[in-house]
Amino acid sequence: MDLLVLRHGEAGRSSPSPGDSKRSLTAEGKQEIVDLSNGLKSLEIKLDCIFTSPLLRAKQTAEIVAKSLKYKGNIEEINALKPEGSRLEFYSVLSKLKQDSVVLVVGHEPYLSEMISEGISQSGCRINLKKSGLARMKILSTLPKIKGELRWLLTPKHLKKMT
């Protein structure tokens, strides 16, 4: 399985605050995701499924990528992808997919970096996924935890240059 791990784009803070779950992407955050999507399009990435955190900024990020890549399936909101969610629950979701699936996961920090680190190392390495950053992992097993190989770790600047 190929797992594309995407951190949501830059989100604004409004006053009075509507709460963390309602924070939306800024204009700059939306543009970074559009640029990233164009980079993915140039790589001819074909997604089998998209999973996103139910928080607004993650859903907006997933929708932009899905539209750009002409993804025909549903974007599935997964509570386990919330910042405080359970990675073990998410790994269980992944375990039900076909081995040759290409999956996009959109979420938050530090959840995503910890998931990547946990999946590629036994020795506590630390990955830092920037806003609008993208990692690609080749997943070799999903239960009880994911195990695999890191194939890419790209910043928004890398992805913009790919178009």
Image (cartoon, grey):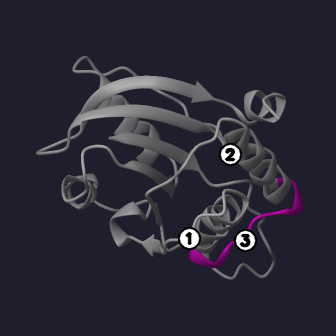
Label located before the other in sequence (3 or 1): 3
Q: Secondary structure at mark 1?
A: loop
**Residue 67 in the image: x percent, y percent?**
70, 66
Residue 110 in view: no
Quadrant where the N terminus is found in the figure: top left
Please name which of the two marks, 1 or 2, marks the residue nearer to the observer.
1
Residue 15: image location, x then y, percent: 81, 78
Q: Residue furthest left?
A: 144
Residue tagged by mark 2? 132
Quadrant in the picture for the C terminus: top right
What residue did someone put label 1 on? 72
Labels 3 and 1 touching (C-beta < 8 A): no
Q: How many marks?
A: 3
- Separation of residues labelled 1 and 2 (CA atoms): 22 Å
Compared across the picture, whether 79 is left or right of 157 comes to left
Q: Is residue 5 left or right of residue 163?
A: left
Disc with the residue nearer the chain's start (3 vs 2): 3
Amino acid on which disc 2 is placed: Ser
What numbered label is drawn on residue 24? Answer: 3
Quadrant for residue 64, please give it.
bottom right
| Magenta region, residue range | 21-28
- Indicate the secondary structure of the residue bearing disc 2: loop
Q: Residues within 10 Å of mark 2 (few under 14, many from 20)?
A: many
The answer to whether residue 127 is left or right of residue 91 is: right
